[in-house]
Amino acid sequence: MNISQTGATLSGSYSLTAGTVTETGFQYGISSTSLTSSISSNIAASFSATLSGLSSGTTYYYRAYAKVHGTGDKSTTVNTFYGSTQSFTTASLNTWLSNYEIPATRAAALSASNTLYAGRYCHDTFTETYGSTKACRYNTSDANQKVVTHTYSYNSKVVRNYSFLYDKTYKSALWVAYATSNSGDFEDNNVSRNDAWAYDPAIDQSWQPNLGSAYSSSNGRSYDRGHQVASNDRQTTTEQNQQTFYYTNMTPQYSSLNQGQWVELEKKVQGVATVTTGNDTLYVVTGPLFEGKLESATDKNGASCPAPSGYWKCLMKCTFSSPGVMSAAVGCAYLFDTNSSNIAPSVVTIDTIESRTGFDFFVNVPSTLQNAAESQTYSF
């Protein structure tokens, strides 16, 4: 299937044992229960039709059909046979934010007058500290929040590394979203941990903690520079791994948690990614909780940094029957209700994390698959 911002080419087929096929084509629409438009095609055992004038960044549903007359006399009753309903999503103008794992954002509107990079629109671009590509930044309706996508180069193309929503007040990313598998753009080349600690070039330094050294505290707690996207989640290229050491990817995480159950959960995610190949992709969104009275840590400059009250991680594994056509999705989430001890996470639904955080996750996954996956606790 070929999919663009405003069009798609659909394919179907039939096997006939009796009668005469007089028409083939497709019914389609923006609801799986209301396929209100149709387009006919060439009559052949394998047929196709090209849709145009579609809306960008929109999920469409469709099914193939064939009209068959009985043998001999063509004036006999016409029977119409339908294939199963499938879906596809047209490309978005703002394609860095149209990836399946990106939560709903309040990014400001984009137009052709905005900066264009690698076929994507963004409000500002910044040269990555590591690598030759650029980071894209998006303004939001909150002056204290920005969305950023980091990129790297692999196999002669620009690849999205991860995206996040950064908050100036908390000096933290409120969510970080990324895709992972053991093939294609995210294959594991074992580039190792680089410890390339650095300010994020896409966020003003005044918004970021100085994490040239570990957090300190006056409350007797030991806080690590806790990764949200783990270093071991990004082992394709050296530059891809180095970007996980930007200060915006860190939170002050209690040392026993960071080095205990949190890293065990990271290993679990990496284990799922190891067996996720071919048409399967694992999508991850992770982030902190800031609830109730918060403790604080101190950065290298002596600035106070709010310490999260807990953490969460949402997983959705999606299967594609062809590029851009998702056929299945399963999901679950993990919740650490505390940032103070090395305890195992609770296994919960993605819906539970949405309720706690106020974020709407995986909004670009077709709703019929998204809703079911977000309400389950799939055993990865």
Image: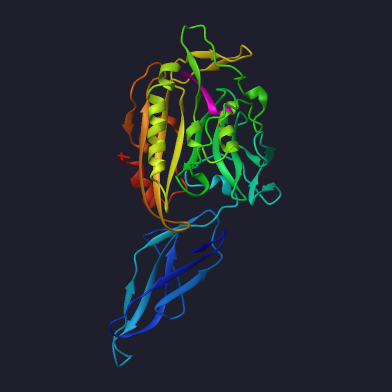
Q: Quadrant of residue 246?
A: top right
Q: Quadrant of residue 332?
A: top left
Report the coloring of the rendering: rainbow
Where is residue 370 drawn, in percent x and y?
Answer: 39, 47
Where is residue 347 drawn, in percent x and y?
Answer: 32, 32
On screen, residue 341 versus residue 191, left or right, reads left
Count the labels in the image.
0
Asked whether residue 62 is in view, the answer is yes
On screen, residue 219 versus residue 341, left or right, reads right
Asked whether residue 359 is in view, the answer is no
Helix, strand or loop: magenta stretch: strand
Magenta range is 248-254
Q: Nearer the viewer, residue 125 or 131?
A: 131
Quadrant containing the C terminus in the rendered view? top left
- Determine whether 158 is above or below 227 in the image: below
Q: Is residue 137 magenta?
A: no
Where is residue 84 drawn, in percent x and y?
Answer: 34, 65
Residue pictured at 47% horizontal, 6% vertical: 220
- Determine whether 135 is above or below 59 in the image: above
- Determine whether 132 is above or below 74 in the image: above
Q: Nearer the viewer, residue 106 or 302?
A: 302
Where is residue 21 drawn, in percent x and y?
Answer: 36, 83
- Determine whether 218 is above or below 165 in the image: above
